[in-house]
Amino acid sequence: MIPAMPAFVRLLAVLMVLATVACRPAAPVYPYENEPDPRGEEFVLGAGDQIRVVVWRRDELSGSYEIPPNGFVKMPLIGSFMARGQTPSQLRAEIQGRLKNFIKDAAADVTINVTRISSYRFTVSGKVNRPNLYAPAPYVTVSEAIALAGGPTRFADLNGVYILRRQGGERRIPVDIDRILSGERADMNIVLLTGDTVVVP
């Protein structure tokens, strides 16, 4: 038979639990649900991305193109057009519309394939093992970004991590990695956007 725990030991255990809870910082307050999650949407092309344009039975019009910093791609016959900021579907419609002026049967014969993605970039800085600029295949969450950076150092404050986001106006988004990893606040594990900076203090 296991002897009963003395009353003072039980009291001490309760006090230790309460002290732990009291010392834990309050969860950040932020409308995480308002931040975009582009994973369910078509990728938006940017500078450095490479596309393959295939015009059926028109090898002379097909080719691979890297989107330059100014965003304009030049194809035979139809000339230059803006590719940066468009999805592959939008780009396909643009090319098909222009080809109609030259080829009668081109309306449904264009295929756009994204062969390389380089425009999706973010920075992880602060107390991580490999602070750097990262350009993975999209998309990653804030916890995945920290893992890419080799994880936090032993001195990192995982309750004080934040994202500097410049899209739509610069703002600071607080995240609590401890609460994300415990499953308590999965809503904080937002998807990073191009240009974001994750700061691990």
Image: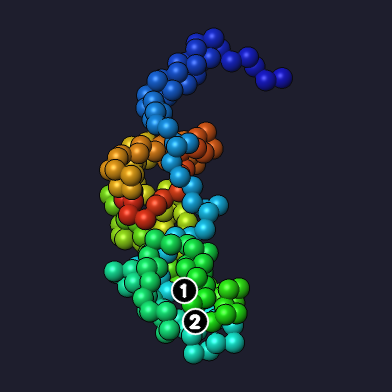
Amino acid at circle 1: Arg
From the viewer's perspective, tell me whether residue 99 is left or right of residue 126: right
Residue position for label 1: 98
Residue 180: give x, y in percent of width and height. 48, 39
Image quarter of the N terminus: top right
Image quarter of the C terminus: top left
Q: Secondary structure at mark 2?
A: loop
| Residue beneath the point at 41% across and 50% down | 192
Name above or below for residue 194 compared with residue 8.
below
Residue 27: give x, y in percent of width and height. 41, 28
Name above or below for residue 66 compared with residue 131.
below
- Give the CA separation, mark 2 to mark 1: 8 Å
From the viewer's perspective, tell me whether residue 170 is left or right of residue 11: left
| Residue beneath the point at 29% across and 69% down | 70
Q: Tell me the colour scheme of the image.
A: rainbow
Amino acid at circle 2: Phe
Disc 2 + disc 1, Cβ < 8 Å: yes
| Residue beneath the point at 45% across and 37% down | 34
From the viewer's perspective, tell me whether residue 85 is left or right of residue 87: left
From the viewer's side, name the closer residue of 96 and 123. Answer: 96
Q: Is residue 83 visible?
A: yes
Residue 102: give x, y in percent of width and height. 49, 81
| Residue beneath the point at 43% across and 68% down | 117
Residue position for label 2: 102
